[in-house]
Image (spheres, helix red, strand yellow):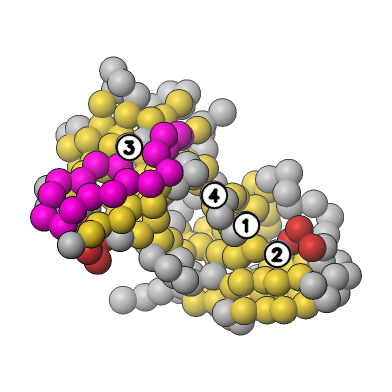
């Protein structure tokens, strides 16, 4: 079964510092991977996805993610964190068929950016 | 920018009562989904819907649950007889169909918080 793991429940970083939110995956076939963000009392917002091609994927709000096949990882990164980036981040993987398909989410990582 | 909307934002009900959660997906999307998130836990898939029928459902989506697209814009989730453990945030999502070699992102609504007393 397709799955993702987020090993950290919470990540704390100072504003202006780089941030990394970790995700590892276990999939059959080619990996397709997503990152979503959830702000308090809001729905999930799409940040970026990896389908194929460049291992560094750029997304919304200055976020990027690095796909690493040998380490089966898809870590979310941002060069300079903002307080407004504080939110809950989810890594996700779709099912094995294309088109519309269910997403399986990781357990989420709470990012806290402090002044 | 088009968005998925959901009503109500918060629903309180007594155990055993029926509830209907409503969603308006993005107008040109063809796939529709329901997910739920129990407080403090991860987001879980419930059901996907395409071409007026369920395309996939999880083990959570038992006979107490049903979905419907009653008209060209709404997409509903019905829980026939609510249980305490149904208390959760329910998210609707929609997406373009994509292709067999591509996956399009799903767009989520703000959620309906269901509280079963």
Q: Chain of mark 1?
A: B
- The numbered mark at residue A22 is 3
Residue under disc 3 on the same chain as residue under disc 2: no
Do the residues marked 3 and 1 share a common chain?
no
The answer to which image quadrant residue B112 occupies is bottom right
Identify the secondary structure beneath mark 1. loop
> For the residues tagged 2 and 4, is the chain the same?
yes
Q: Kindly check if marks 2 and 1 are in contact, taking CB atoms under 8 A apart as contact.
A: yes
Q: Of label 2 and label 1, which has the lower sequence position?
A: 1
Percent position (x, y) of residue A31?
38, 30
Point 74% across, 52% down: residue:
B61
Residue A50 seen by the camera: no
Q: Chain of mark 4?
A: B
Left or right: residue B35 compared with residue B19: left
| Inter-mark Cα distance, 2 to 4 | 14 Å
Looking at the rendered structure, the number of numbered marks drawn on it comes to 4
The residue pinned by badge 2 equals B87
Question: How far is the residue under mark 2 from the one under mark 1?
Answer: 7 Å
The magenta stretch is A4-21
Identify the disc placed on residue B38: 1
CA–CA distance in space, label 3 to label 1 = 23 Å
Looking at the image, the residue that sits furthest to the top is A70
**Judging from the image, what secondary structure is the residue with disc 3 in?**
loop
What is the x, y in percent for residue B2?
37, 75
Q: CA distance from mark 1 to mark 4?
A: 7 Å
Query: Which corner quadrant of the image does residue B9 belong to?
Result: bottom right
Q: Determine the chain carrying the residue at label 3.
A: A
């Amino acid at each position: 079964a397709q799955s993702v793991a987020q090993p950290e429940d919470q990540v704390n970083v100072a504003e202006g510092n780089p941030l990394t939110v970790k995700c590892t995956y276990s999939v059959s076939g080619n990996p397709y991977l997503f990152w979503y963000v959830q702000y308090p009392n809001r729905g999930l917002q799409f940040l970026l996805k990896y389908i194929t091609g460049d291992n560094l994927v750029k997304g919304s709000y200055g976020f990027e993610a690095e796909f690493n096949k040998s380490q089966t990882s898809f870590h979310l990164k941002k060069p300079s964190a903002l307080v407004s980036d504080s939110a809950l981040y989810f890594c996700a993987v779709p099912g094995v068929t294309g088109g519309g398909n269910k997403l399986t989410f990781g357990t989420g990582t709470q990012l806290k950016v402090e002044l | 920018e088009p968005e998925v909307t959901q009503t109500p934002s918060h629903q309180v009900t007594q155990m055993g009562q029926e509830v209907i959660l409503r969603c308006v997906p993005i107008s040109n999307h063809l796939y529709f989904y329901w997910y739920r998130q129990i407080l403090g836990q991860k987001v879980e898939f419930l059901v996907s819907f395409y071409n007026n029928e369920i395309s996939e459902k999880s083990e959570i989506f038992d006979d107490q649950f049903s979905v419907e697209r009653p008209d060209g814009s709404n997409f509903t989730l019905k829980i026939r007889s609510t249980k305490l453990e149904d208390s959760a945030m329910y998210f609707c999502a929609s997406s373009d169909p994509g292709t067999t070699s591509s996956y399009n992102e799903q767009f989520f609504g703000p959620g309906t918080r269901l509280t079963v007393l």
